[in-house]
Amino acid sequence: MRVALVQHSAGSNKAANLLRGLAAIEAAAAGGANLVAFAELGFEPFYPRVPAAGPVAHLAEPIPGPTADALCAAARRYGVIIVANLFERAGDHCFDSSPVIDADGTLLGVTRMAHITDFAGFHEQGYYAPGDGGLPVYATRTGRVGVVICYDRHFPEAMRAVRDADVVIVP
């Protein structure tokens, strides 16, 4: 499995951020990558750098939704697995979430960060609810992929949950 890690600047223009990400996917595929992984909130600013000042759901989007749908189309077009990270809105809650997309464009599932911290520069408790779906391992065209998001990597239980993965992505 050849993995491309994408870390690019993300400003307030979500459309421009998405176009930059789609170009990175194309370049990674051209370079022989089978899996393209993005940094945490790779398509929007890192909102938790400051405490939330009121409701934040308007900043988030559903999965499936506009960004995830565009990533599914790119996965299908270039034949690559994509692990992204988005600010997800689901019902009355928002999550730090990673959709996992197979190389045929199928959304295999979404991993949500379970441990929500509140430190200087990481005021996540005002933005995210704790994940509610566990830490699955996804069977993809190229291998078994686990996802452990950000702060979850500090907990041995999280890493044990994805021990059967061929590769673990940590946005």
Image (cartoon, rainbow, N blue to C red):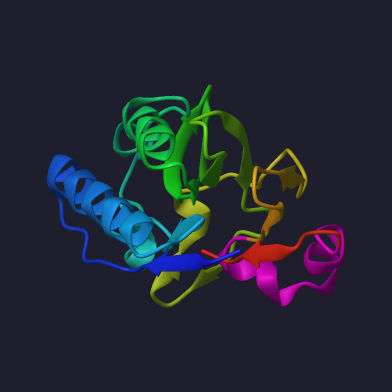
Asked if residue 74 is positioned above or below residue 22 in the image, the reply reads above
The residue sitting at 54% across, 66% down in the picture is 2
Q: Nearer the viewer, residue 76 or 15?
A: 76
Q: In this view, does 59 lie to the left or right of 156?
A: left
Side (left or right) of 82 relative to 110 = left
Residue at left offset 30%, top offset 38%: 59
Foreground pick, 11 / 162: 162
Q: Main secondary structure of the magenta part?
A: helix
> Can the viewer see residue 21?
yes
Point 38% across, 27% down: residue = 69
Residue 40 within the segment the image draws in magenta: no
Which residue reaches farthest top?
A: 91
Q: Which quadrant is the N terminus positioned in? A: bottom right
| Relative vertical location of residue 93 with respect to residue 131 in this rendering, above or below | above
Along the viewing direction, whichever of 28 and 155 lies nearer the viewer? 28
Q: State whether residue 44 appears in this view.
A: no
Count of residue discs = 0
Tell which of 48 and 168 is nearer to you: 168
Residue 8: image location, x then y, percent:
26, 66
Q: Where is residue 104 shown, x and y percent of the image? A: 52, 32
Which portion, as a residue range, is magenta? 149-163
Tell me which residue sits at (70%, 56%) in the image: 146
